[in-house]
Image: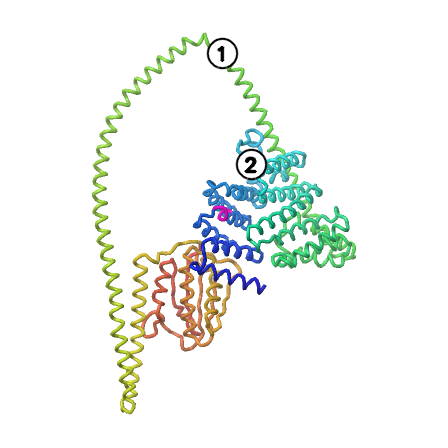
Amino acid sequence: MKRLVLIMLMVLASVATEAAMSAADSIRALVNLFDLTLAEDPYRADSIAEMAYHRALSAGDTLMASSMLAARADINANSRDSLNMLLMRAECLSACRSAEENILFIRLNINSWYRDNALESERLRRFAEQSRRYMLDPPVDLNERIVLLHSVCVSMPFYLNSSTLYDHFSDLAALIDRKPEQYFKLKVLLCRCEAFGYLQIGDIDRAMGADLRMLSLMDSIETSIHRLGRNYFQLNFSRFRVYTRLLSNFEHLTPVQVRQYYQLAHLYLSKSSRARREFAVLPIADIFYYLSIKDYAHAAPLLDTALEYPELSKPRRLKLLRNRVICAEALGQDSILHATGRQYLRMLESMLQQNMSDSDRGRRAVYEAFVARDDLSRFEAQQREQQDGRQRVINVSIILIMTIMFVVLLFFWHQKMRSRRLAKQLMQANRTLQIEVETKNAAIERLTADVDAARASAEVKSDFIRHLAEELAPPFNAIGEHSRLVVDCCHDHPNREYLAEYLASIESNSAVITALLNDMQRINSLEDGSAIPQHRPVDVSYLLSLVVDSVTASGATIPVLLTLPPERLQILSDEVRLRQIFTTTLQCLVQLTPESVAITAHRSTDGKHSVVAFAATSDKLVNYNLFAGPTRLDGMLYTRLLTHLVGGDLLTDTTYAAGLRLLITLPQA
């Protein structure tokens, strides 16, 4: 863990110093940081992937940019809005063939979202529409055909339990095989789709075969990506999940296979911290291993721990309840057997009733698709019969056609006369519009002249403020130096104490005026447009962690306590300006307090803002004014204006009686 933190800090320092490396080096550093962070915290890795995408896009590296979008799609697989946004970005890169696999990967992830997260009615409606389209009019384009067939396959196990599913999976595999060999991502998604689909219909052997093929593909992916220079990329967490899923089918495994999969699951458990966090609440691998060797005494408490996890899916919870009943019966736990058995039966009846209704609706949807195809065939036959009939009576209808042509000629003559009248009206309207355009052009010229005059005035004001600051600083410095000289020369003078107080007053006022001049120059840079923020989604919690690390690493001796909420606080703001605001505020409080600084972040009661509080506990700081008077600090006035510029507020908490607390309020994204 310490090694990982050191590597992350080194990579962050390298990325922050853009002048010290080329664009390719900075992209590689961000990608390495992404690979390292993905193994620990996927949500933080998501923000790093966003940075790498923008850096690769600006450097023209389309392949890396689309790869980062695909990586973000894998992380945000449970958010349809995020997947649609990533697909829109990826399609902007569709001119480059290297982005094709990543675009397909994102589109297939959207199909999987409907399987795992959509409402039953929405999933059924989408399955019926796309199944009907695939049967009646499949697309010619290979990519569109892959996406459509994959969408049908991911939802079909909910509604069908027949050989149709096997045929569709075979067709989908044949389509993906037509893609180049290096399209590993599509093949992994195919294996995952097959594993879930076959498990859904109860074909355990085919499901385990798909999982084993997925493990082989993971090895190929790691080898190819390491060959490209991404040495920190690893799929240990994914392998752990696959081996855990294989162990869940222990009834279909030999004892040798059970021991082998259990050892491999624990091997990758030791290599992945994400796997360890999941294993702490869901020890599935140990549960199924102990059940396979009939060690019910060890399996029972692990099953109780897993059943307390609130986010278990219904099929998984049903399977664990069934095994808990078996353990209670073997251990003679009558009370647990009775309670767990009743819960198992209630859930089984509920799922059985729902699955029966879902299956009926699915079969009805497929039946309607076949009926629609038959209707289309009958319609085409009727069309052919009608065409033959028209051919037989064509000689009889010549006179009627001639009459219709004469009527059409009369109609066109009438339309021509009408078009002439409309042309005259249009010419008159064009003349009126031309006069209005000339009037507006004259107004635009006047406004342009006014804008140029305003810009010239702003430039004069900026020059005046800059020269004022430059001309006022030397006299005030001279006054201070002369006052110090007078006091130093009057060692034995009876008014030396008065002169020293006078010197302190001069130095205090000089510091206030110097801070005011500095703020004037900074405010001038805000007004001339050089500090206009670029609004993007920013993770406040992650940004505060970086600020605290940078301030404490710069030599600050005052301890800084950071308290963050469990949920993510994300706002729409300028990350660079926001980091400057947090850093300046923290540095000022560190200079003022002799004790410690506490930082807290939380969501406001209205749910529309995030509040970051910087508190310095000290009796001397009660009613301390950072922004005006002799106690003002250099840079705080500019910091407050910069906070307003990014859409927030920087205020002093007047109700805080233990010292000084500053509240920064920022709008939620």
**On the rendered structure, is 203 left or right of 434?**
right
Looking at the image, do the residues carrying marks 2 and 1 touch, with CB atoms under 8 Å apart?
A: no
Magenta stretch in the rendered image: 62-66
Residue situated in front as seen by the camera: 141 or 388: 141
Q: Let me know if residue 235 appears in the view.
A: yes
Residue 436, position as x, y percentages in the image: 22, 38
Residue ID at (40%, 75%): 621
Distance from disc 2 to disc 1, alpha carbons, whole Å, reads 40 Å
Mark earlier in primary sequence (2, 1): 2
Q: Quadrant of residue 669?
A: bottom left
Say which amino acid is labelled 2. Leu
Identify residue for label 1: 391
Disc 1 crowd rating (10 Å Cα; few below 14, some 14-19, many 20+) is: few
Residue 157, position as x, y percentages in the image: 64, 39
Identify residue for label 2: 148
Q: Secondary structure at mark 2?
A: helix
Residue 157 against residue 621 in the figure, above or below: above
